[in-house]
Image (tube, rainbow, N blue to C red):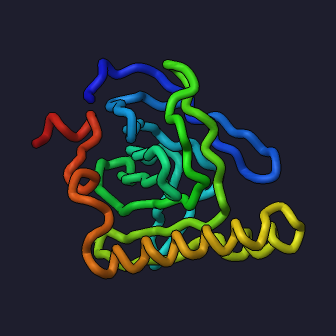
């Protein structure tokens, strides 16, 4: 359901106990999905396939799902050009909003997937998962589940079924006026 845009804090946990807070604007809310628009604040740009994919000031539309092992960020550079999709592998969230102004805690399971605008995929942060396993921050069974979920996403991308059409068609507020 489309809601009157309002501020919301995305609460993001990095195991074992690092809790971050990110501000965004809630655009849509249902019992199974939130859509949150956010301007990124990052210290260091990130590259994939030779191009910057994440940088300070990039616009992201986050799709956060109830009971899914991932979230999806649709990324745009400072000029409004779509750059790709960033998928975090996460613990499924049973309840999306802890309050009208805060998401429930989203727990990152280290692995990420970048989907370039041309459809190429790149797995990110495998080394972080390995370090977390070595340090016993994540169990072997949970790490294997995270890997399996990432593999399933990659297969879906290659089959042309991910991201879903609703995500592909969704435009941030800033770009809707130009359509």
Quadrant the C terminus occupies? top left
Residue beneath the point at 55% across and 31% down:
103
Residue 36 location, x and y as percent? 41, 36
Quarter of the rendering occupied by the N terminus: top left
Relative side of 52 to 162, left or right: right
* Residue 22 in view in this figure: no
Residue 45: x %, y % from top left: 57, 59
Give the image location of residue 108, x and y in percent. 64, 54
Query: Is 14 above or below relative to 105?
Result: below
Please say whether residue 67 is visible from this viewpoint: yes
Q: Residue at x 72, y 75 (%)?
A: 127
Up-down relation of residue 10 to residue 83 (above or below): above
Q: Is residue 78 above or below residue 118?
A: above
Residue 39 or 7: which is nearer the viewer? 7
Q: Is residue 127 left or right of residue 147?
A: right
At a point 45% along the width and 38% down the height, the residue shown is 38
Residue sitting at x 61%, y 44%: 106
* Residue 140 percent location from the top left of the image: 76, 73
Instruction: Name the quadrant containing residue 17.
Output: top right
- Extreme residue in the right direction: 135
- Extreme residue toward the left, this view: 179
Q: How many marks?
A: 0
């Amino acid at each position: 359901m489309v809601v009157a845009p309002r501020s919301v804090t995305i609460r993001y946990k990095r195991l074992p106990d690092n809790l971050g807070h990110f501000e965004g604007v809630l655009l849509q809310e249902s019992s199974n999905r939130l859509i949150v628009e956010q301007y990124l604040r990052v210290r260091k740009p990130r590259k994939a396939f030779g191009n910057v994919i994440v940088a300070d000031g990039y616009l992201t539309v986050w799709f956060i799902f109830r009971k899914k092992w991932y979230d999806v960020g649709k990324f745009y550079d400072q000029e409004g050009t779509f750059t790709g999709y960033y998928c975090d592998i996460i613990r499924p969230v049973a309840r999306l909003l802890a309050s009208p102004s805060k998401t429930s805690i989203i727990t990152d399971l280290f692995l990420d997937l970048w989907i370039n605008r041309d459809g190429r995929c790149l797995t990110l942060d495998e080394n972080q998962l390995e370090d977390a396993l070595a340090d016993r921050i994540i169990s072997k069974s949970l790490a294997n589940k995270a890997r399996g979920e990432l593999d399933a996403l990659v297969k879906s991308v290659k089959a042309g079924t991910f991201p879903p059409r609703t995500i592909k068609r969704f435009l941030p507020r800033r770009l809707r006026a130009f359509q």
